[in-house]
Amino acid sequence: MSDRISNLDIEIGAGSVFEQLGLPDAQERLRKARLMSVINDVIRRRGLTQRGVTEATGLNQADVSRLQHGRGSRYSTDRLLSVLSKLGVDVEITQRQGRVGESIVEVRELSRARR
């Protein structure tokens, strides 16, 4: 098996994986993935259980589980921003074109609420 792995060609691409895969709405998918990452970082930092997240955000347990597993296709950017707001977290979203024309989306956490 290791012989087959050593014969693989690996190419490191520029831009988002969503663009590389040719998925529709690649920029929106990347933006939502970045927002979910911040949400999950906050959950981990605070040591919140799914129940704690549901109480803080009003999401149900299934929604929290989906977000924790990166399945955010059913959530709008606005809804994810609302979750962050309910968690007391401010973010800044920057979207720009990279050198080779790829989309670059950055989500930066600005504040951490004390809860």
Image: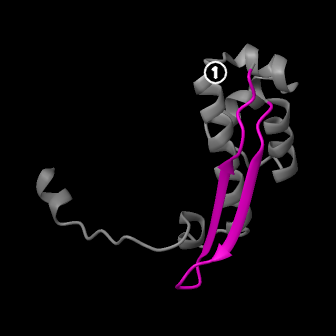
Secondary structure state at the residue bearing disc 1: helix
- In this rendering, the answer to whether 56 lies above or below 88 is above
In which quadrant of the rendered view does residue 8 lie? bottom left
Displayed quadrant of residue 5? bottom left
The front one of 16 and 9 is 16
Q: Is residue 77 or residue 107 the one in the foreground? A: 107
> In this figure, what is the number of numbered marks?
1
Q: Is residue 97 magenta?
A: yes
Question: Residue shown at 80%/20% (left/top)?
Answer: 54
Outermost residue toward the left in this view? 3
* Extreme residue toward the bottom, this view: 100
Relative image position of residue 75 (x, y in whole percent): 81, 46
Q: Residue at x 76, y 37 (%)?
A: 89
95 is within the stretch colored magenta: yes
Q: Residue at x 37, y 70 (%)?
A: 12
Q: Residue at x 34, y 72 (%)?
A: 11
First to last magenta residue range: 88-114
Q: Position of residue 62 (x, y in %)?
A: 75, 26
Q: How is the image coloured?
A: one colour
Query: Does residue 21 appear to the left or right of 23 in the view shown?
Result: left
Query: In what quadrant of the picture does the C terminus appear?
Result: top right
> On screen, 24 above or below 77?
below
Give the residue number, with chain letter if any, for mark 1. Answer: 46
Say which amino acid is labelled 1.
Arg
Q: Is residue 15 above or below residue 29?
A: below
